[in-house]
């Protein structure tokens, strides 16, 4: 019997400060730039002020990219454009600076942290700071078996919680969250289909690496079979993650929930982080108030999950590569919103009188 109940997060997570948000909105009405002229940047500035509990909003000084890595047994069915058990190569590309997220992070001067939750490779292939948290080597084939045992699922969620605490304690003030996985979009589609009550064909996309029609049909069949195993355990989020999630997805879920407890905002990337967020919402309905949807990836399951959580993506650039790249592209928008909300001057008394006379 697990000692961890994700429903307990419902009592631990509060919404961003509504009074502070109202103060931020009132201050915005006094700025020299007309309210609404900055479009969605106004809304983002108000959201950040509420999350920080500060007016004017503080600049984002210590953002960080956090990537959870893992392999999924379902990839052995050729449902991914990448080879099964190959997620360690994605990790290596980031470490060596040759992946999209590494390039973007270098350009933005944002540090990247990689957490191996369930890679299926020899630990010696990667640095110790990456592999030392591993819960298990690869996750089970979710169409025919559980991804994790109950004990492993709890360990993975607690791992994510611990990483969130470490980031919050170190001063990280905003996280760009992503994944480095092979087969992860299949598990994510299954979770979203189960939680939204939809069929496999509605949520099955072509993944970050892109797959042909035959691979899509295999993926759709895998999601269908995994859904049969997911539906009986829908009442318990931890059991659901154990049945059809994976070590990386369970860790990301724990990370998202604990980040909300610690009042640390998170930008979600693609379908994998959206699936974990949806599980988190089922556990704690206030949690999505701490998250932003960085981008629309084109995965149908992601769109379904974001709609369920009422999260409106900041960008729609067709970025499907994953790795947190799309969410990282949205970071400058959030930083710009903070800078504008903090640094634009308020109107003088004479300007206010003139506007009032009009």
Image: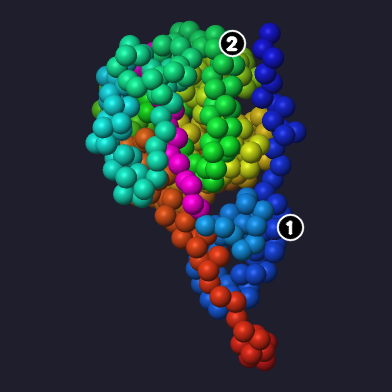
Q: Where, quadrant-wise, is the N terminus in this rendering? A: top right
Q: Earlier in the sequence, mark 1 or mark 2?
A: 1
Point out the stretch of residues depicted in magenta.
60-76
Q: Secondary structure at mark 2?
A: helix
Relative image position of residue 202 (x, y in whole percent): 45, 31
Q: Secondary structure at mark 1?
A: helix
Question: Where the C terminus falls, by quadrant?
Answer: bottom right
* Nearer-the-camera pick, 119 or 60: 60
Q: Which quadrant holds residue 50?
A: bottom right
From the viewer's perspective, tell me whether residue 251 is left or right of residue 260.
Answer: left
Q: Nearer the viewer, mark 1 or mark 2?
A: 1
Quadrant in the picture for residue 206: top left
Q: Which residue is mark 1?
A: 19
Q: Which residue is mark 2?
A: 150
Looking at the image, residue 97 lies above or below residue 15: above
State the residue in front, 290 or 285.
290
**Horizontal side of residue 98 vs 258, given as left or right:** left
Q: Is residue 172 magenta?
A: no
Which residue is located at x 66 percent, y 86 percent? 349
Residue beneath the point at 36% across and 48% down: 109
Q: CA distance from mark 1 to mark 2?
A: 41 Å
Residue 317: percent from left, percent from top: 35, 49
Display coloring: rainbow
On screen, residue 265 versus residue 208, left or right, reads right
Camera-side residue: 74 or 257? 257
Q: List x then y, in percent, for residue 192.
A: 52, 29
Residue 173, visible in the rendered structure: yes
Instruction: Find out whether residue 68 is within the magenta segment.
Output: yes
Q: Which mark is residue 329?
A: none
């Amino acid at each position: 019997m697990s000692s961890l109940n994700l429903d307990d997060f419902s009592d631990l997570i509060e919404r961003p400060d509504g009074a502070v948000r109202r103060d931020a909105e009132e201050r915005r009405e006094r700025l020299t730039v007309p309210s609404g002229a900055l479009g969605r940047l106004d809304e983002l500035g108000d959201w950040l002020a509420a999350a920080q509990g500060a007016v004017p909003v503080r600049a984002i000084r210590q953002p960080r990219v956090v990537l959870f890595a893992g392999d999924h047994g379902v990839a052995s069915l050729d449902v991914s454009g990448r080879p099964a058990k190959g997620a360690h190569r994605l990790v290596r590309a980031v470490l060596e600076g040759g992946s999209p997220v590494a390039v973007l992070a270098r350009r933005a001067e944002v540090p990247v942290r990689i957490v191996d939750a369930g890679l299926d490779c020899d630990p010696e292939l990667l640095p110790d700071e990456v592999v030392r948290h591993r819960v298990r080597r690869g996750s089970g084939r979710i169409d025919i078996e559980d991804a994790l045992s109950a004990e492993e699922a709890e360990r993975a969620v607690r791992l994510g919680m611990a990483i969130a605490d470490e980031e919050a304690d170190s001063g990280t003030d905003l996280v760009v969250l992503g994944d480095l996985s092979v087969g992860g979009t299949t598990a994510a589609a299954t979770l979203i289909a189960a939680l939204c009550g939809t069929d496999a064909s509605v949520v099955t996309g072509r993944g970050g690496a892109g797959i042909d029609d035959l691979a899509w049909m295999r993926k759709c069949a895998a999601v269908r079979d995994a859904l049969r195993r997911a539906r009986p355990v829908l009442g318990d989020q931890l059991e659901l993650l154990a049945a059809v999630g994976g070590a990386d997805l369970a860790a990301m879920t724990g990370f998202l929930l604990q980040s909300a407890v610690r009042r640390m905002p998170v930008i979600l990337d693609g379908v994998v982080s959206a699936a974990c967020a949806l599980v988190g919402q089922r556990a704690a309905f206030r949690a999505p108030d701490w998250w932003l949807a960085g981008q629309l990836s084109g995965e149908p399951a992601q769109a379904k999950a974001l709609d369920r959580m009422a999260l409106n993506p900041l960008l729609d650039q067709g970025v499907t590569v994953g790795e947190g790249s799309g969410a990282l592209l949205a970071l400058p928008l959030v930083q710009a919103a903070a800078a504008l909300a903090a640094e634009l001057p308020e109107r003088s008394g004479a300007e206010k009188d003139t506007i009032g006379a009009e």
